[in-house]
Image (spheres, coloured by chain):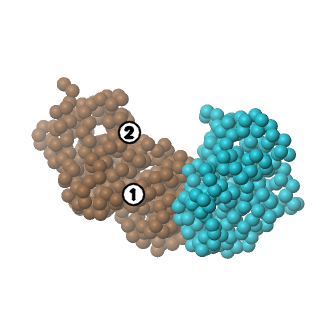
Chain colours: A cyan, B brown
Amino acid sequence: MTHLNDPVPLIREKALWMRRRAFRMVHEAQLGHPGGDFSATDIIATLYFGVMRFDPKRPDWADRDRFIMSKGHATGALYTVLCAAGYYPEDWLDTYMQPKSRLNGHPNRNYLPGVETNTGPLGHGFPVAVGSAIAGALTGSDHRTFVLTGDGELQEGSNWEAAMVAGHRKLKRLTLIVDRNRLQQGAGTEETSGLDPLDEKFRAFGWQVVEVDGHDPAALLAAFATPTDRPLCLIANTVKGKGVSFMENKASWHHGVPNAEQFAQAMEELV
Amino acid sequence: MVQAAPKAAGLHDCREAWVTTLEALAATDPRIVAVVNDSVGSSKLGGFQKKFPDQLINVGIAEQVMVGVGAGLANGGCIPFVSAASCFLTGRSLEQVKADIAYANFNVKLVGQSSGVAYGELGPTHHSIEDFAWLRPLTNLTVIVPADPWETAEAVKWAAAHEGPVYIRLSRMPVPEIVVPGRTFQPGKAQVLREGGDVAIIACGTTVHLALDAARALAGEGIAARVLNMHTINPLDDEAVLAAARTGAIVTVEEASVRGGLGGAVAELTSAHDPVPVERVGFPGFVPTGSVDWLFTEYGLSQDGIAAAARRALARKRK
C-alpha cells in the first residue's frame, strides 16, 4: 500500500481509532497489556498506513512486506491494526480473549490472517524476521521485513544472536524497531538490566541506527526511508501508556486493566 | 507372513543417505535450504555447501536464532532443513521448537544429528536421550527415527514433500541395512518386520536390528516374538501398538531415556486400553561416560538385553 499524498493525517486517524478500540477490548476482557499497546501504536500505524506493501485479500502474497510483532503481548495494537488494514471484520475484535477466540492473548498465525508468526515468549520474533529477510534474498523477493521488539525484551539473549546474524549478512531489507519506552513490567529497564548505550550496541553489531520519536509519524516515515546497505535499527523513543494521562510512564499499566471510570476518562482523552 | 531377511553385509552411517538425498532434492528445488549452527562437518554438509553455497545458512554457534531463522525461511517460502547435534537442537532451542516451529506450524524440517548416546565418551551434556520426551507432546510435529540408510532417505524425501514441521532423528552410529522385501515407508504407520504371537518387541532407530537379533535368538527357545519398527514416535501408530498388546506382552527398545519416549508412549496407550506388561529398554537417566558400544551393552540395548526383557515381559503376562 503506497501513498502519493501525505499519509500523516491518515496514520494519526488510524492510531487514534486503534487506541480507543484496543482499550475497549482490554476493558471488556479485563485482560491485556495496554501500556505496551499504546507505546507501539503510532509505530505500527505508520508501518501499515504509510510504509508497508500488503494486500489484506492475499495474506500469503509472496512479495508482501512482513511485520512481525516480537512483543507478542501487545495484541491490542496488533489486532486493531490488522483489522484497520482490512484483514478481518471489526466484530472479530469483540471476541478478544474469549474461549476459542481467534484473538488469543498472544497472536497465532494459523487463526488470524495477517499474523506472520506466533509470538508471546520474548525474543522469538526477531530471529524469525532474520529468517524471513534471508528468504527474501534467496528467493529474489524485494520484500522488506519489519520487526518490533520491546526494549526490556532485548534482555533475552536470542535477540543478540539475531542481531549478529543480520549484521554479518548485511540484511538491508530488515528493519528492527525498538519500542524504547524504558519500562518493563515491574520497573525501568535501566534499573533492571540496563540497555544503554543501545545505539552503540547495534552499531557494533553492524547495524545502521537511527533514533526517532516513536509517536511522530512524519519522523517515523523519514526514519523508515533511511538509505542503508545494512540492517536498519530504529530506536523509537516512546511513552508507555501514551495518550492517556493516568497511564503514561507507569509500569503498572504494563498489564493493568481499566475500571469503568478509568475507561470513561480514557475515552474522553483519546480524541 | 513378513520375515526380515538376515542382515545385509556391512554397516552404514545414515548421514551419508541424509546428505545424498538432500543434495538430490536441492538440485531440483531451490527452495531447499540447510540451516546449521557451525555444524557443517558433523552434519556431513561440506559437499552440499560446495554445490549449493547460497542454500547453506550457517548462523554460527547460536541454536535459538538457528531455529527461529528456520521459521522465518519457511515464512518466506523456503523449505529449510535445520541440522544440528540433536542435544543442542532440541535442548538449547526447545522453546523455539515449541513456539516457532510446532505451535506456529511452520514448514520446517529439524534434523537431529548424532542423537542418543552417539557422543558416548563426551558425557550427558552431549547425549541426546531426552529429545523424544521433549518433542513427543508437541502438536503438529512429526517425529521420525529412521532405522537405516534406506529409511533415512525415505524420511528426508517425505519430509521435503510434506507441508508441516518434522523432526528427523539421525545417528552417526553405523547400522546394518534392514532388508525387507517390498519395503515401504509410511509415516505414522509402524512396520512389522517379523511376525510372532508370544511377545511383541517395538523398537526404533539404531535398535531395530538388535530387536531382530533378539527375536531370532528367542525363536531358538521356542518364543515367537513379533518385531515392530516404530519409525514414527509422533504420531504413534496406536493400532499397531494395540495389536502388539494382543500378544499379551510388550518390550520397547530405544536409544533414549525410558522416561517419556517410545516406551512411555506405549505405556500410556496400553494402560488406557489394554494394560499388558511393558518392559522398557533404554537409559534410566544420565548415564556414565563410555563408548557407544559399552553403553549399549551395559544398559541392555543388545540382543541379550532385549531377549532378557522379553522373558521378563513373558513372565509377567496375565494368566
* Res. B74 visible in picture: no
Q: Is residue A246 left or right of residue B105?
A: right
Q: Is residue A7 left or right of residue B184?
A: right
Tell me the residue at 21%/50% (across/down).
B299
Q: Are marks 1 and 2 in contact (CB under 8 Å)?
A: no
Q: Which residue is mark 1?
A: B86
Tell me the residue at 45%/47% (across/down).
B142
Is B115 situated above or below B211? below
In the picture, residue B68 is in which quadrant? bottom right
Quadrant for the C terminus of chain B in the image: top left
Disc 1 from disc 2: Cα separation: 24 Å
Q: Position of residue B12 (x, y in %)?
A: 29, 62
Tell me the residue at 39%/70% (across/down).
B41
- Residue placed farthest to the top in the image? B319
Q: Position of residue A2 (x, y in %)?
A: 80, 59
* Res. A210 visible in picture: yes
Same chain assignment for discs 1 and 2: yes
Tell me the residue at 23%/60% (across/down).
B290
